[in-house]
Image (spheres, coloured by chain):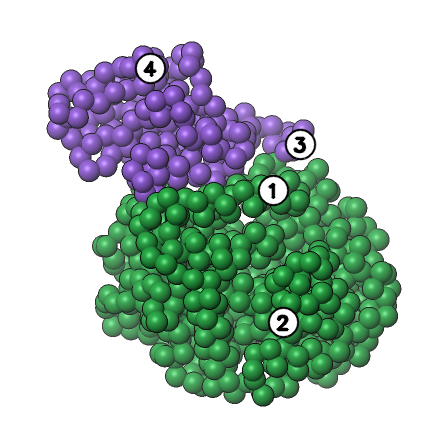
Chain colours: A purple, B green
């Protein structure tokens, strides 16, 4: 999975740019499999891609078009997909994109992880053995972008507490 | 010749009508289109705050692409502050979203009779009621719109209470703290009763020649990463310049009364980073990510950049940096330009120091140097036009007319636009830039940065003479400013961040031509781009001449011509501005 460190992410969206460019030869966040949640009034930035979570609610696919690959990535069998967006709505952190009737899952660039390569702050990293549970986010009601923002806000609570206690960028 | 024509969305606010068309010919993006549109469509002599003014917001063909920091939009209209051509750019993420929505230029004509906002969802565009947003500040408006439209990724460009109240230096802001700061574009938006522009865009930017475009992008990225200022810009952003300006002897301490600020180490970039910066922040697709997020006991927010930091500390004689940062956050929320606001306050403090005015003239507010009361209260009063704020909201030039001759002598403005936080006497190329450029007292048309680095070889390469690299020499500055203006116009059309393209000198016309050629899929030469910039530079001059601009206005405030810098490394320097203006006119082929 692609991990983003909330304390380091600066919110430049270079990951979105390279992801859409690598996969589609064009730039648009709507084509990106990684999305940056930005909470501008609290200074929070966090890039979110499929975390290969232990729950994997996206697999409740009505046409069985989804399966799990060797690295934990979600694989789509295009011929079986009917574009119903059940997986998009099921993802607790809004990490499934959707473009031209097909869901977009982080495919780890077949190991090349372009977003990790390009990330200028070093906030992104590839982690092969993480076991992330997103159970506490399953019940959150909202659109995918609202879920991303909610997830980012929760991840940033300790960071904001440290700011309040006086921690600064170099401490 | 038309290098690229984009889609223009025309919004008639008087009749609530939305039409579609093309951007003008002879343009290469953003500012080039806006300036031509205004020359064609704004009648001379109109009231900038009346319905006859036209407000343009534009991006360019490279915006929202893979090109580093292709992140700006330019807002242009006749300026309510100068009465001449006004325009200003904002970074952040609004511009790419507008490009992805498929709109290259928005042209607002007329004025609505009730408050509205424009909602753009790709090709769907509608004006909506904004009565519930009236009075909300920039943060509140942005958050409210994202909440009620249930999309936290929406991009919002909005005005604050200052823009609603037609403060003549109010801003249009996106991403809470990224502003079209200069020349009062927020007041023009407010005069049209347009509270905000909200955009959702999903259409990709696809280069026609991906390999050529990618090569240009890679070249730019490599140029940036190899630059000797790369790490310090990433760490400090523009605040890094405060120590440098102090070493050059051009700090405007106590409103240009001294070039030495005794408490520099309490307010400089290191102090800011040590005490108030909690993290770095970035604009769209930028590997420099030079912005910073601050956290203070008063408030939090993005910034300050050097201009706000210096204006609310050094220039006002305030050594309480935390207060200065908080004022920066406040003006961003209220929606007033930090440069003009800081200049208004610092000028008042000098007037009081000189005995030209008393505290009683300013509603009893303590105007001693560094006054906490003045710094906390005046921005609020200006934005809401309360008490003396109503007069100060007109800018220093108009306010000084009320306070008389002696107050007028102390102003630091050109054509009504307030000067930045550096002393033009000791950086003469910047002095000339402030005197002659199309929007008044402004360093940022293009940055004659070569004279700050002193790089003679670069000066020779860019403008054909070595003298231009010497900041205290008046020779060669006409050519330097002409080149810097072309670079500024190019950058305002590529919509790339000028702190990168101009200040770091990592983009030239050749590299720009490669980026345009790669994106558009046909050969565009550096010469063609230069010609477009020359043409539009003349368009901007023609607009101002039509509004009655006279040669005598191409000058600096008399205090910089008559009175030498009193102390510090550039002590004794004045600026022979008319000599440089003549040199510049020759460069332009003007009489």
Q: Earlier in the sequence, mark 2 or mark 1?
A: 1
Across and down, in percent, residue B449 comes to 65, 59
How dense is the environment of label 3, judged by Cα within 10 Å: few (below 14), some, or many (20 and up)? few
Give the SS element for disc 4: loop
Mark 2 vs mark 4, CA separation in Å: 60 Å
Across and down, in percent, residue A171 comes to 67, 29
Mark 4 vs mark 3, CA separation in Å: 35 Å
**Chain under label 1?**
B
Q: Are marks 3 and 2 on the same chain?
A: no
Q: Is residue B185 visible?
A: no
Asked if marks 4 and 1 touch (Cβ < 8 Å), the reply is no
Which residue is identified by label 1?
Answer: B226
**Chain under label 2?**
B
Instruction: Give whichever of B64, B353 is nearer the camera.
Output: B64
Give the SS element for disc 3: loop
Query: Where's the N terminus of chain A, which quadrant?
Result: top left
Label disc, if present, on residue A170 of the rendered structure: 3
Give the SS element for disc 2: helix
Give the SS element for disc 1: helix
Label disc, if present, on residue B434 of the rendered structure: none
**Chain under label 3?**
A
Which residue is identified by label 4?
Answer: A72
Asked if marks 2 and 4 touch (Cβ < 8 Å), the reply is no
């Amino acid at each position: 999975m692609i991990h983003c460190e909330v304390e380091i992410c600066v919110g430049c969206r270079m990951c979105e740019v390279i992801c859409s460019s690598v996969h589609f030869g064009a730039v648009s966040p709507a084509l990106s499999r990684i999305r940056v949640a930005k909470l501008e009034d609290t200074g929070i930035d966090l890039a979110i891609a499929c975390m290969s979570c232990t729950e994997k609610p996206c697999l409740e696919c009505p046409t069985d078009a989804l399966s799990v690959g060797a690295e934990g990535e979600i694989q789509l069998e295009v011929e079986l997909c009917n574009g119903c967006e059940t997986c998009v709505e099921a993802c607790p952190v809004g990490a499934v994109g959707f473009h031209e009737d097909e869901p977009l899952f982080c495919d780890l660039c077949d190991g090349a992880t372009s977003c990790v390569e390009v990330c200028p702050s070093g906030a992104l990293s590839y982690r092969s053995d993480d076991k992330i549970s997103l159970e506490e986010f399953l019940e959150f009601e909202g659109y995918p972008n609202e879920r991303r923002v909610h997830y980012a806000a929760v991840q940033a609570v300790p960071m904001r507490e440290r700011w309040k206690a006086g921690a600064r960028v170099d401490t | 010749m038309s290098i690229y024509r984009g889609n223009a969305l025309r919004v008639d606010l008087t009749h609530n009508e939305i039409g579609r068309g093309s951007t003008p010919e002879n343009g290469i993006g953003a500012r080039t289109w806006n300036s031509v549109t205004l020359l064609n469509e704004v009648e001379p002599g109109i009231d900038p705050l009346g319905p006859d003014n036209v407000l343009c917001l534009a991006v360019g063909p490279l915006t929202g692409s893979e090109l580093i920091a292709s992140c700006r939009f330019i807002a242009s209209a006749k300026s309510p502050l100068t009465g001449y051509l006004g325009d200003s750019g904002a970074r952040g993420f609004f511009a790419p979203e507008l490009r992805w929505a498929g709109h290259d230029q928005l042209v607002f004509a007329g004025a609505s009779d009730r408050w509205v906002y424009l909602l753009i969802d790709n090709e769907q565009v509608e004006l909506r009621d904004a009565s519930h947003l009236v009075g909300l500040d920039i943060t509140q408006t942005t958050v409210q719109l994202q909440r009620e439209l249930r999309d936290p990724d929406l991009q919002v460009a909005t005005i604050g209470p200052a823009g609603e109240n037609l403060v003549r230096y109010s801003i249009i802001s996106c991403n809470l703290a990224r502003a079209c700061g200069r020349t009062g574009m927020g007041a023009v938006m407010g005069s049209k009763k347009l509270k905000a522009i909200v955009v959702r865009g999903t259409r990709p930017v696809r280069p026609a020649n991906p390999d050529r475009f990618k090569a240009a992008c890679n070249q730019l990225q490599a140029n940036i990463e190899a630059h000797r200022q790369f790490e310090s810009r990433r760490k400090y952003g523009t605040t890094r310049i405060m120590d440098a300006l102090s070493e050059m002897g051009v700090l405007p301490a106590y409103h240009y009364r001294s070039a030495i600020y005794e408490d520099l180490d309490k307010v400089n970039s290191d102090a800011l980073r040590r005490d108030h910066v909690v993290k770095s922040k970035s604009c769209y697709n930028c590997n420099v990510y030079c912005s910073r997020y601050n956290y203070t006991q008063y408030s939090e927010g993005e910034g300050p950049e050097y201009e706000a930091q210096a204006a609310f500390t050094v220039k006002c004689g305030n050594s309480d940096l935390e207060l200065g940062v908080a004022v920066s956050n406040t003006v961003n929320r209220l929606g007033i330009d930090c440069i003009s606001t800081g200049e208004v306050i610092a000028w008042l403090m000098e007037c009081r120091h000189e005995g030209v005015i008393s505290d009683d003239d300013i509603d009893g507010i303590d105007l001693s140097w560094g006054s906490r009361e003045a710094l906390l209260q005046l921005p609020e009063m200006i934005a809401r036009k309360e008490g003396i704020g109503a007069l100060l909201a007109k800018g220093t030039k108009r306010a000084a007319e009320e306070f008389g001759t002696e107050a007028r002598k102390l102003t630091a403005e050109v054509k009504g636009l307030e000067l930045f936080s550096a002393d033009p006497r000791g950086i003469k190329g910047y002095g000339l830039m402030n005197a002659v450029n199309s929007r008044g007292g402004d360093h940022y048309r293009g940055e004659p940065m070569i004279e700050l680095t002193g790089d003679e070889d670069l000066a020779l390469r860019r403008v054909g003479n070595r003298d231009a690299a010497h900041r205290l020499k008046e020779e060669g500055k006409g050519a330097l400013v002409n080149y810097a203006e072309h670079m500024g116009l190019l950058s305002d059309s590529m919509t790339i961040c000028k702190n990168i393209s101009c200040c770091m000198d990592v983009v030239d016309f050749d590299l720009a031509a490669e980026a345009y050629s790669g994106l558009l899929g046909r050969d565009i030469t550096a010469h063609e781009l230069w010609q477009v910039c020359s043409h539009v530079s003349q368009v901007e001059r023609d607009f101002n001449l039509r509004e009655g601009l006279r040669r005598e206005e191409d000058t600096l405030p008399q205090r910089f011509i008559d009175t030498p810098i009193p102390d510090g490394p550039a002590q004794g320097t004045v600026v022979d501005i008319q000599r440089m203006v003549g040199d510049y006119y020759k460069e332009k082929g003007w009489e």
